[in-house]
Image (tube, rainbow, N blue to C red):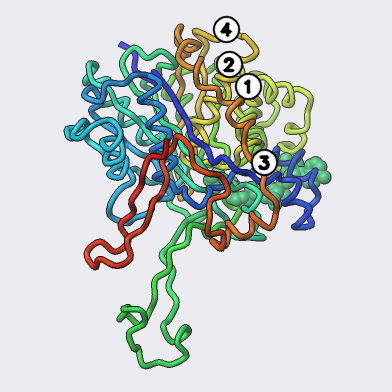
Amino acid sequence: MKTGIDAISFDVAKIHLPINTLAKARNIEPEKLEKGLGLIKMTLPDTHQDTVVFGANALTKLISDNNINLNEIARIYVGTESTIDSSKPISSFLIALMEQKFGENTLSECDVVDFTFACIGGIDAMQNCIDFVTLNPTKKAIVVTTDFAKYDLNSTGEYTQGAGALAMLITANPRIIAFENIWATSTKGVFDFFKPYRTISKTAITGNSNNEPWFENLESKIEIHKDQPVFDGQYSNQCYMDRTRDAYFSFKKLKNTTETVYDSWKSIVMHLPYAFQGRRMLSEIYALDASKTIISGNEDASEYQNKLKEISKSEAYKEFVNEKLMPAEIASSLIGNLYTGSIFMGLLSTLAHFYDTEKEISGSTFGFLAYGSGSKSKVFEGTIQPDWKLAIAGVNLFETIEKSFEIDFDTYNKLHKKEQKTSIQTPKNEWTLDRIENEIPNLIGARYYKWVD
Ligand SMILES: CC(=O)CC(=O)SCCNC(=O)CCNC(=O)[C@H](O)C(C)(C)COP(=O)(O)OP(=O)(O)OC[C@H]1O[C@@H](n2cnc3c(N)ncnc32)[C@H](O)[C@@H]1OP(=O)(O)O
């Protein structure tokens, strides 16, 4: 029996800033961002949107477009690194909203939980659901990934921002892709990118050291939550390269093959924090697993790096990228980073590209290289199923992204600094954040959402 993705839907932020506008404002050569990193637009949440809204929109679409009977859904597992509560998971909000829309108690026997491991939490959620469905083939599960990749103004992450969610139905005998049961993992506990609890002393805020109550905070230190990560961009790239390389060669060992693994993959779908990350990071694996030796691994460090650079600029590598990686990059260039959703958006982008260009890919194998900072990589593969076209015919990925609304730099700044108080676009046929409770003591901070027709 096969297990995998039967249906897929998405909801990405509907407003964007062109990368060219950002580059000019920041005095960065636009060509560096457009041609060097593959960026065209970055999407941003409107004032009425958060990660619950994106997740709920993607899930509502998945359920409606595929006429899913909610009684059949045994699990809804969420991958996110942008949660809005340290205790109540996003999946708990999603259950409430789906019952609001599709009927009370329709999901009361459904198991729900969030998975957090930076950008790889969605893959962890999916692997778990696949194992579950393999053991219980009559049951179905849903994986939702939802994130807001927000970086500090003027940081090197600023041009890679993005926001949105995907939802995937996991079943036996799926219509889109069936995964092989070989999962290779590489893990190392590092600080390449993280979102710590930060503190600021009350003395620094009030100017005295009496520890007087400050807006009901009795502690002498005030805790601050920020959506923006603490990170070291180049170090995070090195961790990405090291983990994916190690997981790739573990995968090769688990497959027990001496053949070049990537040669058997029609497409390679990687975690893309920005469009060209995959092509910039994959040259090492491309060289080390080549059928004809192009790098031995015995070179000294600088010679090794020089050779990798040379390989990454070669015509053969460019062709390889064009054939195996480019389809996954298209959506990323137009959206930005979706953290947990990026690898699934890469898959959807690849499928939509082959659908639009009328290529038959049924029976071909895709390789997946997932990465989450902190850090972990998983490598696995799946085979495209005969009904893949039928299953994605109504998804309309590129048509939907095309309709995104352009904002100017001033509006971008206001949104980033939370100075924008009203919605840029009037919500229609979607969930919105209605209000956050700030008076009733035992409901302080509770977030309430509503569906807008
Ligand atoms: C965050 C996650 O989602 C998890 C992860 O994957 S961690 C790994 C990725 N890390 C991140 O995304 C963290 C946030 N991002 C960043 O800090 C940065 O965007 C980054 C580190 C990823 C990139 O850093 P950067 O300093 O902006 O770019 P840099 O590494 O110098 O690369 C610029 C590229 O543009 C090219 N370039 C520069 N000027 C150019 C021009 N005028 N024309 C064409 N190309 C140009 C450079 O040659 C270089 O490409 P190659 O190395 O492939 O040749």
Q: Position of residue 266 (x, y in %)?
A: 58, 16
Height in image: 354 above or below 243? above
Write the residue at 30% across / 29% down. 129
Q: Which residue is mark 4?
A: 360
Q: Nearer the viewer, mark 2 or mark 4?
A: 4
Disc 2 marks a residue whose amino acid type is Lys
Mark positioned earlier in the residue sequence (1 or 3): 3
Mark 3 is on which residue type?
A: Lys
Judged by depth in the image, the label closer to the viewer, 3 or 2, is 3
Q: Secondary structure at mark 3?
A: strand
**Relative to 161, is 86 above or below?**
below
Q: From mark 4 to mark 1, how far is it between C-alphas?
A: 15 Å
Among the two numbered marks 4 and 3 on one chain, the one whose residue lies closer to the N terminus: 3
Q: Nearest to the eye among marks 4 and 1: give it.
A: 4
Which residue matches tag 1?
Answer: 324
Q: Amino acid at mark 1?
A: Lys
197 and 207: which is toward the camera: 207
Q: Quadrant of residue 242?
A: top right
The structure residue drawn at horizontal position 68% and vertical position 25%, both measured from the top left corner, is 321
Residue depicted at 50% across the width and 11% down the height: 389
* Mark 1 touches mark 2? (CB < 8 Å): yes
Q: Residue at x 60, y 38 (%)?
A: 335
Residue 72 in view (yes/no): yes
The amino acid type found where label 4 is placed reads Glu
- In this figure, which residue is indicated by the disc labeled 3? 41
Of callouts 1 and 2, the N-terminal one = 2
Give the structural element (helix, strand or loop) at label 2: loop
- Residue 400: x, y in percent? 58, 29
- In this figure, which residue is indicated by the disc labeled 2? 266
